[in-house]
Amino acid sequence: LIIQVSAAQETSFLSRVYSILEATFKFMMYPLTVSGMMSKSARSTNRISYKNYQLLRVFPKNKRQLTQLESLEDDAGVQFWTPLAKNHSTDIIIPPNLSDDIKEFLGESGIKYTVVNKDIQKIIAQQNPKFSKIQRAELKVSHGHAVTWNRYHRYDDILQYLDYLHNSYPNIVELLTIGKSTEDRPLKVVKVSSSSTGDQLKPAIWIDGGVHAREWISPAVSLYILKQLVENFATYGHLVNSLDWYVMPIVNPDGYEYSHTVDRFWRKTRSVTSNREGRFFWNTESCQGVDLNRNFDFHWGEEGASDDPCRETYSGAEAFSEPEARSMADFIMDRKDAIKVYLSLHSYSQMWLVPWSYTKSKVKDYEDLMYVAEKAVNALKKIHGTKYEVGSSPSLLYPTSGSSDDWAKGKAGIKYSYTVELRDKGSYGFLLPASEINPTGRETFAAIRAVARTVIKTSNISEIKKL
C-alpha cells in the first residue's frame, strides 16, 4: 500500500513528531535537573548552590585534546573559568553528578588534570564576610558610607561611596553618569582632578573594573585607588595635581549584581539574546548576555571570540551591541587626546598584558609598552613580593578579539593601553578572599604610580620627583 502525502502534510507530521520528542526529553531530563545537574532556566530566580562542585585544572597539550575539551562546554553544569588554549592550563568547574564521568573522559583522552578544590560552595561561603544591616548602618553613621576594604560590596554600596566622595571632596571629585546598563542601572565614572594647571589640558589616566561580573577583586581595587587619590590627598595630591584621573569601578553592573544574588560565577552582561538555535529548552540561561571584553569595535568577532550566545566569550550580535561598552567607548573617544593611559583591571593570573590581544603580531611601539609594564610590575613586586608576568595575551594566555585594550590602542589611539589580571595565580581564582583586597590594592596602586611617573615625565611636568 502506497500513500501519497503533500509537502504540507509531511511538514505537519514532522512538527508533531518533534514536539513529542521534545516533551519526552524534558520528562527524561527532569530528575537530573532537580537532583544535581541544576536547571539553568531556574537560575534567574534562585541563588545557585555549588555544593560538591569541583574545580579542576586541566592541561591540554595538542589540538585534538582541545577539541575533546570543547565538547564539555555544552554539558549542563560544566563551566570554563578560563578559555581553552593549547599548552595552557584551563580551569573548569564540574557538577557532582558528572564528576566521575568527566574524570574518566579526561583519563581516556590522555588529558592530565589536578583537583584544585573538592567543594566550591565552601570557598564561596568563606570568601566574603557577612555584613548585617546593623553593621552597614553603623558604618554609614561613622564614615558617611558603608564601604570597607575587607569585604566585597554590592553595587548600591559602591554608588553611595561614590556619592560620598563627590559630596565630601567637591573641589577634586566630579561624579559623572555616562549612560545606563541594559537593566537601567547608572554607569558611573569618577573624575579626580585639580585646577593646579589652570586652563592647561592635563594628561589623564583611565582605569576601569568589573567588565566581567564574577571578577569581584577588580571593582574593589578600583575603589581602593579612588580612596588613595581622594581621601589620602595629603599624601598623593601630587598625582592629582599632575594628572586627571577617570575611574569607572564597575562597567558591568547588571552582571555584577547577578553574581551576588544568583550565580557567583556569572561573567557576561544580562542582555537578552535571541539566537538560541540548537539549544531548544536546556542550558538556556547561559545563552543570556554578552562578553563585554569581546564587544568592542576593533577586530570584532575574530579569533578568541564566539558567535554562540551560549558561550562565555560571546561577542554579541554586532560590535557595541551592549550599552555598557558603547557608553564607555563614547566617553573615552571624547577625551582621547587627553587620556594617555588605559588600564582595565581583571582577574585572575597576575599578568600585565600589552596589545595586541587579537593577534600575535606586535604593536609598533611594543618596546615602549613593555618598558613601562616592566616598571609597573617591578614596583608592584616591591610591596608584597607578588610576581606578575608581562606580555601579550596571545603569548601568555590566548587570543582575544574585540577587547577593550586593543580598542583603546587601535581606535582611541591611547599609547599605554593595558589589561591587568590581578591576584591570584589560581588557588582561589575568582573566589579571592576579601582579606586580599587591601594587599592587592596596595601593590596595584604602586604599579599605577610607576605608570604615572612615565606619563608625567613624557608630559614635561615638574612634579615627577615626588612620585
Image (cartoon, grey):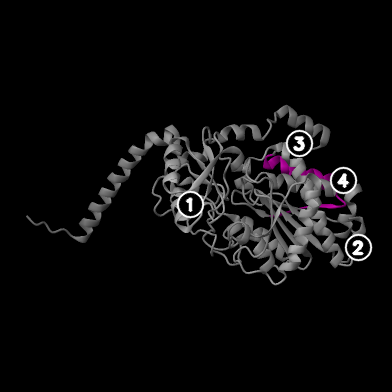
Question: Disc 1 designates what residue?
Answer: 310
Where's residue 411, x and y in %? 67, 69
Name the spot of residue 14 as percent of width and height, x first.
25, 53
- Report the residue at 85% width, 49% height from top: 170
Q: CA distance from mark 3 to mark 1?
A: 36 Å
From the viewer's perspective, is the residue at label 1 or at label 2 nearer? 1
Could you tell me the amino acid type at mark 2? Thr
Above-or-below relation of 57 to 50: below
The local crowd at label 3, few if under 14, some if 14 to 19, many if 20 or more residues have their Cα within 10 Å, is: many
Per the image, the residue denoted by label 3 is: 146
Q: Earlier in the sequence, mark 1 or mark 2?
A: 2
Earlier-in-chain disc, 4 versus 2: 2
Judge by depth and name the residue closer to the eye, 70 or 252.
70
Residue segment shown in magenta: 153-178
Structural crowding at the residue carrying mark 4, measured as other residues with C-alpha within 10 Å and reported as few (<14), some (14–19) or many (≥20)? few
| Residue 156 on the magenta segment | yes
| Residue under numbered circle 2 | 197
Q: Which residue is mark 4?
A: 232
SS of the residue under disc 1 = loop
What whole-number distance in Å separates the C-alpha atoms at marks 3 and 4?
A: 18 Å
- The CA distance from mark 3 to mark 2 is 34 Å
C-alpha distance separating marks 4 and 2 = 20 Å
| Earlier residue among tags 3 and 2 | 3
Tag 4's secondary structure?
Answer: loop
Give the camera-side residue of 142 and 209: 209
| Amino acid type, callout 1 | Cys
Instruction: For residue 256, say whether it is visible.
Output: yes
Q: Mark 3 or mark 1, which is nearer to you?
A: 1
Q: Secondary structure at mark 3?
A: loop
